[in-house]
Amino acid sequence: MGGMTFIDLRDRYGITQLVFNEEVDAELCEKANKLGREFVIQVVGIVNERFNKNANIPTGDIEIIVSELHVLNAAVTPPFTIEDNTDGGDDIRMKYRYLDLRRNAVRSNLELRHQMVMEVRKYLDGLGFLEVETPILIGSTPEGARDFVVPSRMNPGQFYALPQSPQLFKQLLMVSGFDRYFQIAKCFRDEDLRADRQPEFTQIDCEMSFVEQEDVITIFEGMAKHLFKTIRGIEINEPFARMSWHDAMKTYGSDKPDIRFGMQFVELMDVLKGHGFSVFDDAAFIGGICAEGAATYTRKQLDALTDFVKRPQIGAKGLVYARIEADGTVKSSVDKFYSQETLQQMKEAFGAKPGDLILILSGDDAMKTRKQLCELRLEMGNQLGLRDKNTFACLWVVDFPLFEWDEESKRFMAMHHPFTSPKPEDVHLLDSDTGAVRANAYDMVINGVEVGGGSIRIHDSALQNKMFELMGFTPEKAQEQFGFLMDAFKFGAPPHGGLAYGLDRWVSLFAGLDSIRDCMAFPKNNSGRDVMIDAPAPLELSQLEELNLKINIKE
């Protein structure tokens, strides 16, 4: 520009403008004009106040008048632009993740992650917690999600597993007298992936001795408030809301409800059943939500909602809707089956007003239909702009069932894990009404995301053996898998409990991300692959032989 050359120099801290003056040093200016994108350079010069300041960047008040330029490393043209609004799709960015990490948008997520980890350590250290590392190579525990397994060369035919969590070791630390433990722990689960799951993830893992549920909730609600204040500048003074698992499922169809907005479920069995509409007459559950101000939805929009709930992932058979007209009358898609009097009763059940839209689902499985209605509620929340990423609604969900029935194996399974204690007042129901026993467990939910959960643990050998018995373990099987824990209890185990926060979920929530992938330095894709280093990959036959593994290779 008029004998001047300007270069944007980017590093981790921002962009600085370099200035080369052709009249002062034509050779240096010519050298600058040969620089390409992403070249690595070193310059010497004078820091100067800019005439035209740029308020949009941290270094926008200054520029450098360059007197020396050294090219440390030339670079080929990158496969996508290194900008916030890049032209690179997910696949290409994951393949060249080291370039993607140069982008401000991605780097800032990792800086946020670092800040959160430092604040967590500071908070827990201030409360007397001790950071202890637990093993990565452990034994397999098939009761939870699928394990990643590692063959042992020195023990032919035997395998380690990678930990799904440090659960057993942190309980053993309590037996050891380390009364307040925490760890920023890597965990591994061989699960099907989605936006909030990766094969490896990080937990803020904590355990405490001589505590009850209220003690754990108080400590970790305090941590959450500390993070909101120090990271997001949000002061939360009031206690977090609490809701029982039963109420959450009944009102929202989810054990992690998004309470930033209303639209609570209203059951309509008494109002709509028995009027000749067979879909409702034959249903085990009829329920709906009321979307305020949405009566303006067009037929095309309502058809799109019907298609949404009929998607295989949701599985509803259809959708019934009703508009509340300006004069208070109700106009529905099933008018021919219902009198205005009945429709007015329905309107009253919702407390609906003129301009509101009622959406109704039904089905022969109440729990399944509630979950379908939950998906519809969240979709309406999105469409009506009720799920603002900068608004946070925090909730404790408590009183989970201790067990859930597994139809495939025809036995009870632990809803959380086998070491969760039943609520003391429900212990007498273990034999007589096993499914009704509530767990001494708690989850923290923020904006419909489970960011952490935990429980008070069983510390009594007899009660732990009872749990294993109810889950169908033989004494021999329980001893084989968990004998070391049971033996430890015999030497005196304090009452203990804890909680694990998902660090990746916390960071993605604070950063306003749709996927935890974007706050990890080197994530896997939706197939569990690292496309950058092309892993997983086959092993050399010599490696397999050394590990005493045989593999059948089919043509």
Image (cartoon, rainbow, N blue to C red):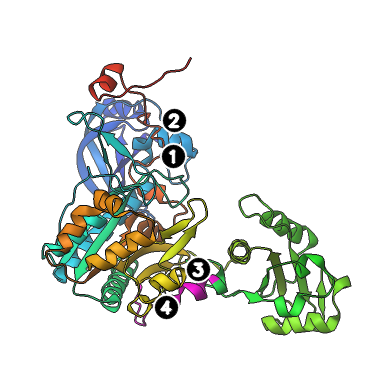
Going by the numbered disc 1, the residue's amino acid type is Asn
CA–CA distance in space, label 3 to label 1? 27 Å
Residue 236: which quarter of the image? bottom left
Indicate which label's residue lies in the foreground, 3 or 1: 3
Q: Using the rendered view, name the quadrant where residue 235 is placed.
A: bottom left
Question: Magenta part of the protein: which range?
Answer: 234-249
- Residue 317 showing in the rendered view: yes
Q: On residue 79, which mark appears?
A: 2
Dot 3 or dot 1: first in sequence order is: 3
How crowded pointer 3 is (Cα within 10 Å; few <14, some 14-19, many 20+) is rated as many
Question: Which residue in the structure is indicated by mark 3?
Answer: 257
Q: CA distance from mark 2 to mark 1?
A: 19 Å
How packed mark 4 is, by other alpha carbons closer than 10 Å (few <14, some 14-19, many 20 or more), is some
Disc 3 and disc 2: Cα gap in Å?
A: 41 Å
Q: Position of residue 346 (x, y in %)?
A: 74, 80
Q: Indicate which disc, 2 or 1, sits on the residue closer to the N terminus.
A: 2
* Residue under label 4: 242
Tell me the element at label 1: loop
